[in-house]
Image (spheres, rainbow, N blue to C red):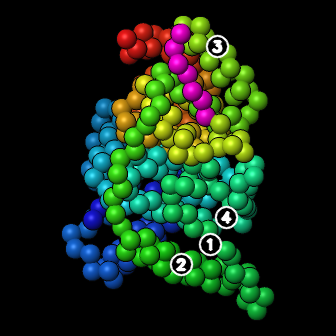
Amino acid sequence: MNIYIATKLFSFFDRRISYMMYEITENVVKELKINNYHIFLPFKESNKKVSMTGNVSKNIFNADIKSLKNIDVLIGIVDGLSLDAGIGFEVGYCIAKRIPIILFSTDFVNSKVGNFQKFQYDPICKDNVNMFKYEYINNKNLSYVDELDLNIETFKKYVEIKIKEVIKKYKNNNKLFSRFKNDVFIDFSGMKYEWNKKITKNLENKINEQNYKCAQSDRYSSEFNSEKELKKLIGSKILVTNYDENEPNFGSSILQGIAYYYNKIIIAYETHQLDYYVDGGQHMGVNLMLEQSATKICRNYNELEKAVLEELKKVVK
C-alpha cells in the first residue's frame, strides 16, 4: 500500500505537523499489519530524490506526480480560511483516481455555503472526500499550554482512529465517466465573486459566437451538484481556470487536479506580478502544483480569450 501525506510545507511548523501526520500514519499501518507499504511525504522525499539543477519547480512537480500516480490512499490536514491550493490539486488528482481521501481540520472557525451543511472545506469535498473535523476540548482546570498539549495528544489519537476506519474499508472505485459533451469548462473560483461572473460571461459569449459548447462551475449556488460538476469537467476538452487570489480557490484547485489526470488542456488566468522564491531553488507565482500542471498561463484577459480560441481550433473538429 502506498500512502501520500498532503499538508502545507512552507514553514518549519508546517513541516513538523506534516511529519507528525507521517508518524501517526506509520503507526496505523504497522498496527494493521500492512506489508510492503510506503508513505510519501513531499519535501522529505524531495530533498533526497529531486534534482536541484535545471527547472527545480518542474523537478519537484514531476516527483510529486510520479508518487500520486502510484498511491492507494491520500491523507491530509487542511486548516485556515484560505486552504492550500497545492493540496487541492492533489485531492483532485486522487478523486479522479477514485481512491480513498482522508482530510482533517483543527480549525476553530466553521463555514457554511448557501443552504449546505455547516463546515465544508469546499462543496466538491462533501461527496468525494472523507472529511473529519476535530473539535477542541476546553478544560478550565488546565493552563493554556497544558490545554493545548492535551488537544494535540487527543488529536493524534483521533487521527489514528479515523485513518484506521477508512483504510479497513479501503477499495478502489470505478473511473468517472461523463455523458456531457462540452468544448470548454470555465471555473473562475466557482463564481464566488462578482468579477468572476463578469469575466466568465465575456468569455462565454466569445466562445458561443464561434459556435463552441461551453459549461461553467456554479459551486456557490444552492443548486450545486458535485457529481454533475465533475462530469461536466470530464466531458470537456479545455479547462479555463483562475489563480488571481492570494491563495487560489480550493475547489478550483481540485478541479484542476482532476483535469490534469484526464489530460485536459488547462488554460489559467494569472495577472499578478509576484514571484515567490522557496528554499531549494524553486520559484513560483502563487502555487507550484497549479502552475506546473497548466498548459498555458495568461497574464491579461485579451491573452486569455485568444489562447482559448486558438486551442479550440486545434482540438474541436
Mark sitting earlier along the chain (2/3):
2
**Residue bounds of the magenta highlight:** 211-217
Report how far apart the C-alphas of labels 1 and 2 lie in the structure: 8 Å
- Expressed as whole percent of the image width and height from the top left, the position of residue 284 reads 49, 34
Q: Secondary structure at mark 1?
A: loop
Classify residue 78 as left or right of residue 113.
Answer: left
Q: Which residue is mark 3?
A: 205
Q: Which mark is residue 107?
A: 4
Q: Which residue is mark 1?
A: 134
Report how far apart the C-alphas of labels 4 and 1 lie in the structure: 8 Å
Report how far apart the C-alphas of labels 4 and 3 lie in the structure: 41 Å
Q: Are marks 4 and 3 in contact (CB under 8 Å)?
A: no
Indicate whether residue 39 is drawn in magenta: no
Give the class, few, some or many, for how many residues have Cα within 10 Å of label 3's Cα (few <14, many ≥20).
Answer: few
Q: Compared with residue 273, is residue 206 higher up or lower down, i.e. above or below?
A: above
- Expressed as whole percent of the image width and height from the top left, the position of residue 73 reads 37, 61
Q: Secondary structure at mark 3?
A: helix
Instruction: Pick out the residue farthest to the front.
Output: 179
Q: Which residue is mark 2?
A: 158
Report how far apart the C-alphas of labels 2 and 3 lie in the structure: 50 Å
Q: Amino acid at mark 4?
A: Asp
